[in-house]
Amino acid sequence: MLVSAVTLGCALLLGQVEIPEAAVPQAPAEAPAEVPTDAPVKALTEALKQPRAEAWAVQLAVPDAGSPRQSPDQRVLCLTLPPTPAVPSGQWRAQCDETKKECLVAPAWELDSEGHETGQPLDRVSMCLEVMPAELARDYRLVPAIAEAPPGWFRDERGRVLQYNFDLHRRIRVGGAWAPRWLRETEGRDDRVRVDFGVDLEWPGDPGQLHRMTLLDTELYLGDASSFEATLLRYDFRSERDEPLFRVTTFYGKPRRFDVFANLGFWLEVLHAEQVRREDVKADFLALGSTHVTLDLWHSRDLVSYVRVRAGPTVERDRTNGFFTLVPAAALEGDLTLDRNGFHHVLFGAEAQKVLLAERVEGRPLRPERLRLRAGYEVIALAINDQPVSLTLDGRGTWRDDLANAPAGWEWSAQAGLRFSLWAPARRNAPMAHGGKE
Amino acid sequence: MVALALALLLSTLPSPDVACEGRTDAGETFPTCFDPGTGWVLGAGLHLQDAEAALLLRTGILVRVVRTSDSKVDSSWFDSHRLFMTEAWGGARKALTFTGYEGLLRRHVDEGSLLVSLGRPVRIPFPFDVAMAVRAAHLERRVWEGPGWTLETGRVGLLLDPVRTNSEWGWLAVGPAASHTLRHDRDGTTHEVSPFTSLMLDTGWETRDGRWALRVTGLAGWAFDFDGGSHFRARGEVALEHVLLAVNDAPVALRLAATGVRGDAGLSRRNEGMLSAGLVVRPFGER
């Protein structure tokens, strides 16, 4: 506090003192071995006591693409230097290395394409609360640099910041796709488009735990045989256990213990509605609630990517025929983020369902079955105002015999489209930018 | 089969200083000894009777207590309790047996003696331990025989053990037994008693690490109906258990059993022979 107050006072004092022109000092040949923390203040005090005869005509260049980058972890000082044609305000941000007697200095304002200062302040930088007097800066070698950027963000030589790392598990998404469908029983093709939207949330719990939630996950199919599928809420909890789930001891030969680790999780779905259309047949199903147990066969260290099996019951309302059913299901599924910056995503799954406790309905089995297959790929193609636009490719297949008076069989759909994502912050493990995108 | 089992047991007897703790590479310890008389039994297997195989399920609670006598010096009690033992098998001959309680309470003394109090008290060496076998609420229900059940309300055996081991790992108890049984069928309920007119055997042997366990039980003698008449019946069972591995320190054992019944099976007092083989897991069964 005292140091800050003294520094601020000195800065105010400097503002009223006419600083004589001085030449740029040469960097000292040898750096001191140890510098006390109040060294800048003492040096400034000494500098003010001794009138300088030489004027300081430093003309610092603006950074280019190859310039070093400031670190977001180090303290930033406000520095005012003599005006230059490129930086007429003379306002810079400095990060100094006391041992090297070197400061990385970046313009405090964004630059235009000609490399001249604009009136736009730098985005996503920490405030510089302390001032570095120009007199003090004379003792340092000043190196043009690019201002710091937070993890997952990249700052160019003009000081503009852009996001290059996206967490697509935290976003509000709206998309559309061309989604034709083929039914095995008919030769024709249903020309449809898909409109989809939803809200994805993800947050870590205690160490080794991850929560994921999807709200209003909706897919509308418009065109031939219009239909929809929507889920009000889906919640998913995964964890990595330090303790083995099973410890198996064998006794033949020397007794040995083998630890079997199993990472169990929980999956919940509330109010899943599905409307199915096949030619003239229409059916509505409303799953009131599903509770599944998950077992990760593999997951990434941060639990974001996984391959797992999932099984559990669902209470479903057959709205077409007016009764409740119990639908046990089992699935093998995966969700993989392929790169560290979250650009490439692969989804796949196979889920089998058996409808139990159904009443007899003319034209369909007493215990119908469903099998759903899905494989999808999403890649971020570009970002508009740091909001990613991704290309989606989907292949889906469904076999079902739960539609009365419709023959059992497969339907296949190939879907390709675009998706716009809002929010999508940088991933929690986003790396720092070092001279370019990681 | 008994001889084979005994031979196996003897060949696998560990040294007296058997270590009951293993150690992982990480330094964690795990048990390697188990108590065949303790734990919660959960088992499934195959039941074979008259060349018909069926699924067999088995459950119950085993408790074994070893304690020194409070009132008598140099004597110890080795008590084995079996609670709610239930066996059910499916197939064409669906049946269920349930035993509310069964226990063998054996008292071991270092120097057995008889006191003759006629005239001057005389102490005579008595080379037996004494034991009491108790069973209560033993229900047998055979669906395939039609309506009806058999309920042994109680049975008690006063037994002598000539082996006199001072551990829970071996015993041989033989003696007379009394019982009361109800048989209920379409014609009503009949009572049947055996007023110590049956001979009972309960013997067992276990390795010190508890990985092998053999138990042989038998009962033979005459039972009398309240409305007159008597009949001879006999029943014997041999069961061998071998711990294959342990899951979460709960032993998983292979159980082989053979049962023979003469004049005592079901409501119609049939003769029967049964074999069974299966796996038994016994949580909380570590020694």
Image (spheres, coloured by chain):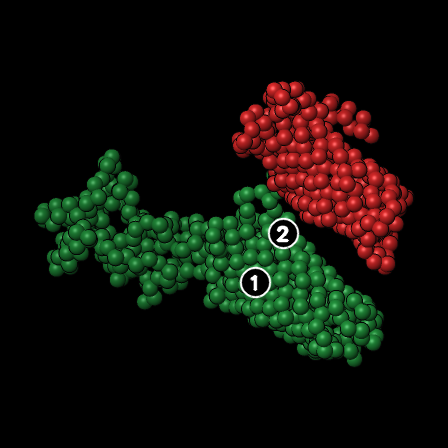
Q: Secondary structure at mark 2?
A: strand
Q: Are marks 1 and 2 on the same chain?
A: yes
Q: Disc 1 vs disc 2: Cβ atoms closer than 8 Å? A: no
Cα separation between marks 1 and 2: 15 Å
Chain B shown in which color?
A: red
Which residue appears at 33% of the width and 64% of the height?
A121
Q: Which residue is mark 1?
A: A235
Which residue appears at 53% of the width and 32% of the height?
B70
Quarter of the rendering containing residue A356: bottom right
Residue A377 in view: no
Above or below — where is B181 with respect to A427? above
Task: Report the front residue among A224 and B97.
Answer: B97
Across and down, in percent, residue A186 comes to 83, 72
Mark 1 — on which chain does it sit? A
Across and down, in percent, residue A227 comes to 69, 76
Answer with left or right where residue A279 lies relative to residue B107: right
Mark 2 — on which chain does it sit? A
Task: Report the front residue among B95 and B109.
Answer: B109
Identify the mark nearer the N-term, 1 or 2: 1
Question: Given the image, on which type of amino acid does mark 1 rest?
Answer: Tyr
Q: Which residue is mark 2?
A: A295
Which residue appears at 71% of the width and 34% of the height?
B158
Task: Report the front residue among A88 and A68.
Answer: A68
Across and down, in percent, residue A130 comes to 24, 55
Above or below — where is A97 with respect to B92? above
Which chain shows up in green?
Answer: A
